[in-house]
Amino acid sequence: MQTSVIGYPRIGTLRELKFALEKYFRNEITATELQTTAKELRAIHWQSQKEAGVDFIPSNDFSFYDIVLDSAFLFNIVPKRYKKLNLSELDTYIAMARGYQGESGDVKALAMKKWFNTNYHYIVPELEDDTDIRLSGDKLWKEYEEAKALGIETKPVVAGAYTLLKLCRCTGERPVSDFIDATIRAYQELLEKCNRDQIAWIQFDEPALVRDMDQSDSDLFHQIYDALLPCAKQCHVLLQTYFGDVRDIYPGLIKMPFAGIGLDFVEGKETLALIQKYGFPKDKLLFAGLVNGKNIWKCDYKKTLELLLTIKNIAKQVVIATSCSLLHVPYTLENETKLEEDVKKHFAFAKEKLTELSELAVLTEEAEPENSESYKKNQALF
């Protein structure tokens, strides 16, 4: 069975990214040196996932700050006060995230807000009345090619258009509805470029779908993707949800021509009931979020395999996935030398969760998984 990771921690094994950023702020390293550190970290993260046998490895999930800010930057959602600083692209991005005080001016950072039900915070994009939403960045394609040069095929990750619009704050007279058409055109251009570059899969993160949705929300979602999906020809679109279930839109969602849909079976209280009631299309991949991406505890293989068996009786094409991005857990247990083994053996951080994905994928193919050493070792903990 195939496996997928929604997103991976970018901080580094020993918080290398944090320290590199701090050195850059103190002018102790150059922008080139900072980007070199980032490139080295991305290579390590991709290689770790490849070695663990992950089939759907994310790219463009690496960020100096936040995937929402990255997506806003990708689509030119940059307030004028930051553009007027006339800084480099990197420094403009950083000014939006942490403010800027220097020769070019004095501006505060964009606001931060709690990222759904996590302890993570995202940068809130601002839409001004004259914001020109369009595809303007190239980070997605640079990092995809970076991974490809290492022999690793990835699925680029972008904040979905619906979620991005829901998270934006309008600062002028125009409401967010005035920006829908421009947003759709920008995402259409993104898909067309992915087609030209022969990118096999693109992951649109749409966690806003797990919130309560009324008819206007549902109409907006359909308006966006009814316009986008016809543009996805060679590129397969994975609609990725997490942090809950999509009960308000599921019946209509599964009728839309997505190549794959990612559902959270950990925090999605109604997810299993939804697929049992409405089914799941045979022509789509179900990316089943079964390995908890938010907590540090080991996965219970017995319970997970039982749930997976139920899912496989409904959906014919299933991929085992993390329930959300792994950026919400520490990087690895390898450096936790002060923890007692009786405690440590119960933990699984990001790198260890890759092993859990791999072992679960193998166990699903075995006639008697309970006789496997990995299964026995896991169950001894429970």
Image: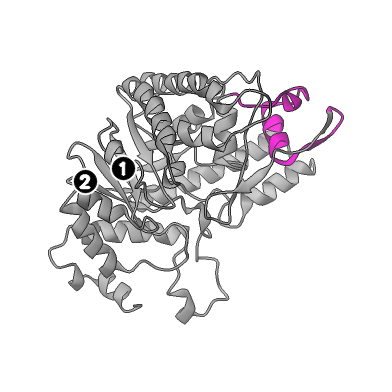
Q: Residue at x 73, y 27 (%)?
A: 82
In the rendered image, residue 5 lying in the magenta stretch gets the answer no
Position of residue 97 relative to residue 196, above or below, is below
- The colour scheme used to paint the residues is one colour
Q: Which amino acid does label 1 sit on?
A: Tyr
Q: Separation of disc 2 and disc 1 at Cα?
A: 8 Å
In the rendered image, residue 99 lying in the magenta stretch gets the answer yes
> Quadrant of the rendered structure where residue 368 is?
bottom left
Q: Is residue 36 visible?
A: yes
Crowding near pointer 1: few (<14 within 10 Å), some, many (20+)? some
Per the image, label 2 sits on a secondary structure element best described as helix
**Left or right: 252 as drawn, with respect to 109:** left
Position of residue 13 relative to residue 47, above or below, is below
Position of residue 1 relative to residue 302, above or below, is above
From this viewpoint, which residue is outermost toward the left? 367
- Name the residue that disc number 2 marks: 278
Q: Which of marks 2 and 1 is nearer the N terminus?
A: 1
Residue 53 placement (x, y as % from top left): 32, 50
**What stretch of residues is rendered in magenta?**
76-104
Residue 254 placement (x, y as % from top left): 26, 38
The residue lying toward the viewer, choosing from 149 and 365, is 365
From this viewpoint, which residue is outermost toward the front? 215
The residue lying toward the viewer, choosing from 211 and 235, is 211
Per the image, label 1 sits on a secondary structure element best described as helix
The residue lying toward the viewer, choosing from 48 and 101, is 101
- Name the residue that disc number 1 marks: 250
Q: Which amino acid does label 2 sit on?
A: Tyr
Q: Are marks 2 and 1 in contact (CB under 8 Å)?
A: yes
Q: Residue at x 39, y 37 (%)?
A: 154
